[in-house]
Image (spheres, grey):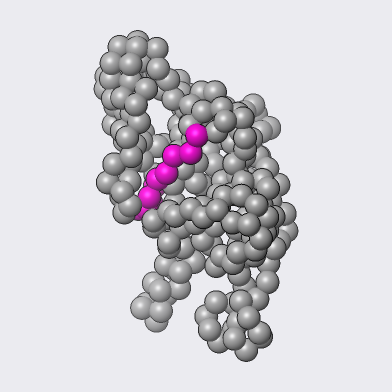
């Protein structure tokens, strides 16, 4: 199965080319268009209680869709906001995704809910994370462009810009600088990520969009 990421970074979408016997798991509502021979089956995202938890705490749908084909066909998957999409391939490892970032994965990938902690909640990153593990490809998106960084030690990310990270990374919350600098620089509280591993960040944040919109409405 070939999957192409098109129209990056502002309006990225996935073009999935099916060969006979291929299948892909996608977030409910992600399908934009598909060939008439594609079969779609809907199921709970990890059982009833797991699905409810992912909806309440992970901002994901209760349901997921499995698309499959017995003959060649095409499927287009999108996300509900303008932005980029990236693909990472798991080799028995785990990635943690921010709520709402998950778009699709290979059927061999496991989806679950992971505890992010109160520090993540204070940083407006959410109490929980979508946990993807196993082997296979995972596609996730964000508002704005997505860029990755390999860190060793500590790195500072503004609140609302962290998209995904490896479980070897810990999250702490702190001020951007001193009290005066933090509150009058416009940065305020920031996320301090520590450890050895890879993080993914987004170039835009919904908080920033809301603040910009409100300033022009008053």
Q: Is residue 98 left or right of residue 5?
A: right
- Residue ranking furthest to the front: 152
User: Which of the two residues, 69 or 1, is positioned nearer the viewer here?
Assistant: 1
Residue 212 appears at what percent x and percent y?
A: 40, 74
* Residue name at image x 44 percent, y 47 percent: 141
Image quarter of residue 167: top right
Measured along the vertical axis of the image, is residue 112 above or below residue 11? above
Magenta span main SS: strand
Verify whether residue 84 appears in magenta: yes
The quadrant of the picture occupied by the N terminus is top left
Nearest the viewer among 149 and 187 is 149
Percent across and percent down for residue 169 are 66, 52
Q: Residue at x 56, y 65 (%)?
A: 157
Q: Which residues are magenta?
A: 80-89
x, y (%) of residue 52? 63, 37
Q: Examine the structure image and report whether residue 158 is included in the region drawn in magenta.
A: no
Q: Quadrant of residue 112?
A: top right
Residue 107 seen in this snapshot: yes
Picture quarter containing residue 45? top right
Q: Which residue appears at 56% of the width and 27% of the height?
A: 135
Spot occupied by residue 140 in the image (x, y as percentages of width and height): 46, 43
Vertical comparison of 123 with 26: above or below: below
In the picture shown, does residue 177 fall above or below 143?
A: below
Q: Residue furthest bottom?
A: 180
């Amino acid at each position: 199965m070939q999957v192409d990421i098109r129209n990056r970074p502002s309006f990225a979408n996935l073009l999935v080319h099916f060969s006979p016997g291929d299948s892909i798991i996608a977030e409910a509502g992600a399908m934009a268009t598909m060939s008439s021979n594609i079969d779609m089956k809907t199921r709970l995202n990890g059982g009833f209680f797991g699905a409810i938890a992912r909806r309440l705490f992970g901002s994901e749908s209760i349901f997921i869709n499995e698309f499959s084909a017995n003959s060649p066909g095409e499927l287009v998957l999108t996300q509900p906001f303008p932005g980029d999409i990236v693909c990472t391939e798991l080799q028995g490892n785990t990635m943690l995704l921010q709520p709402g970032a998950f778009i699709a994965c290979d059927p061999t990938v496991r989806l679950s809910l992971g505890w992010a902690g109160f520090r993540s909640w204070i940083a407006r990153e959410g109490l929980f994370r979508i946990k993807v593990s196993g082997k296979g490809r995972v596609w996730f998106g964000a508002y704005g462009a997505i860029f990755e960084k390999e860190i060793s030690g500590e790195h500072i990310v503004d609140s609302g810009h962290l998209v995904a990270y490896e479980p070897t990374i810990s999250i702490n919350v702190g001020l951007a600088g001193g009290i005066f600098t933090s509150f009058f620089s416009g940065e305020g509280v920031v996320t301090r990520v520590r450890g050895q591993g890879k993080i993914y960040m987004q170039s835009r944040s919904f908080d920033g969009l809301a603040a910009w919109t409100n300033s022009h409405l008053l």
